């Protein structure tokens, strides 16, 4: 390509020189063959065979942060989670009792913050949705600290004997 441009320039020089005082017309900057434009959109969300977030200890194994758990208790009621979830009974969403023994903290964080991505890509969330009459959990746009507070609250409930 560089050689092609060099040749083009060599050919254009005498023409430009012959133009006298007229400003030289710019030679076409377009290379002869423009590289193919990558129009492919981001790959569609794919259901993975294995969860990316299910490795390691279950959430309940870590110590409970009491202040975060208290904040989480309030968030659970004020952010709308109680419309679909409770502890000890399945409603529209799964029964959350024991959820921190079933899942890792990372998995829970992703489920709370990006439920619509999780049901499409994460096999555990995908199966849960199938078990929930295909109801998609709402993305309530929680921040990461909010999600983590909720997880502390669930841990506290699961560890209380
Ligand atoms: C519209 C009903 C609805 C709301 C509101 C909702 N969820 Fe869910 N939730 C579901 C459903 C249904 C699932 C199962 C996955 C799916 O179908 O999206 C689920 C799954 C979960 C799970 C995984 C449960 C398990 O057994 O692993 C957690 C944790 C959870 N939700 C927490 C929350 C929290 C925290 C909130 C509030 C910020 C919330 N959900 C709001 C319906 C809801």
Image (cartoon, grey):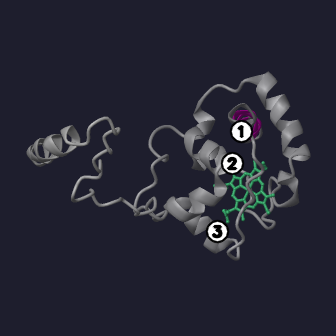
- Image coordinates for residue 87, horizontal then vertical, percent: 80, 52
142 within the magenta span: no
Q: Is mark 2 within 8 Å of ligand 1?
A: yes
Where residue 97 sits: x, y (%)? 73, 51
Q: In the rendering, at what x and y percent does residue 130 appear? A: 62, 73
**Residue 152 sits inside the magenta stretch:** yes
Given contact means CB atoms under 8 Å apart, are the residues at marks 2 and 3 in contact? no
Judged left or right of residue 126, residue 161 is right
Which of the two residues, 7 or 38, is positioned nearer the viewer here? 7
Which residue occupies the foreground of this view, 87 or 7?
A: 7
Main secondary-structure element of the magenta-colored stretch: helix
Image quarter in which the C terminus is found: top right
Q: Is mark 3 within 8 Å of ligand 1?
A: yes
Asked if residue 9 can be seen in this view, the reply is no
- Cβ atoms under marks 2 and 1 closer than 8 Å: yes
**Mark 3 sits on what residue?**
129
The residues tagged by marks 1 and 3 sit, at their Cα atoms, a distance apart of: 20 Å
Q: SS of the residue at dot 1?
A: helix
Secondary structure of residue under mark 3: helix
Question: What whole-number distance in Å separates the C-alpha atoms at marks 2 and 3?
Answer: 14 Å
Q: Can residue 62 be seen in this view?
A: yes
First-in-chain label (2 vs 3)? 2
Query: Mark 1 near ligand 1 (CB under 8 Å)?
Result: yes
Task: Give the quadrant of residue 159.
Answer: top right
On the image, numbered disc 2 is attached to which residue? 112
Q: Which residue lies furthest to the bottom in this view?
A: 133
* The residue stretch that appears in magenta: 147-155
């Amino acid at each position: 390509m560089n050689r092609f441009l060099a040749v083009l320039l060599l050919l254009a020089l005498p023409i430009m020189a012959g133009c006298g005082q007229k400003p030289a017309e710019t030679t076409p900057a377009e290379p002869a063959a423009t590289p193919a434009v990558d129009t492919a959109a981001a790959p569609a969300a794919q259901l993975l065979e294995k969860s990316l977030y299910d490795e390691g200890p279950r959430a309940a194994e870590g110590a409970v942060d009491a202040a975060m758990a208290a904040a989480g208790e309030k968030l659970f009621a004020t952010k709308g989670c109680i419309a679909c979830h409770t502890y000890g009974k399945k409603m529209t969403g799964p029964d959350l009792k024991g959820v921190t023994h079933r899942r890792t903290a990372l998995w829970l964080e992703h489920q709370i913050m990006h439920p619509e991505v999780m049901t499409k890509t994460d096999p555990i969330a995908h199966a849960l949705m199938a078990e929930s009459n295909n109801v998609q959990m709402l993305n309530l746009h929680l921040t990461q600290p909010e999600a983590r507070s909720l997880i502390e609250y669930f841990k506290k409930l699961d560890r209380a004997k």
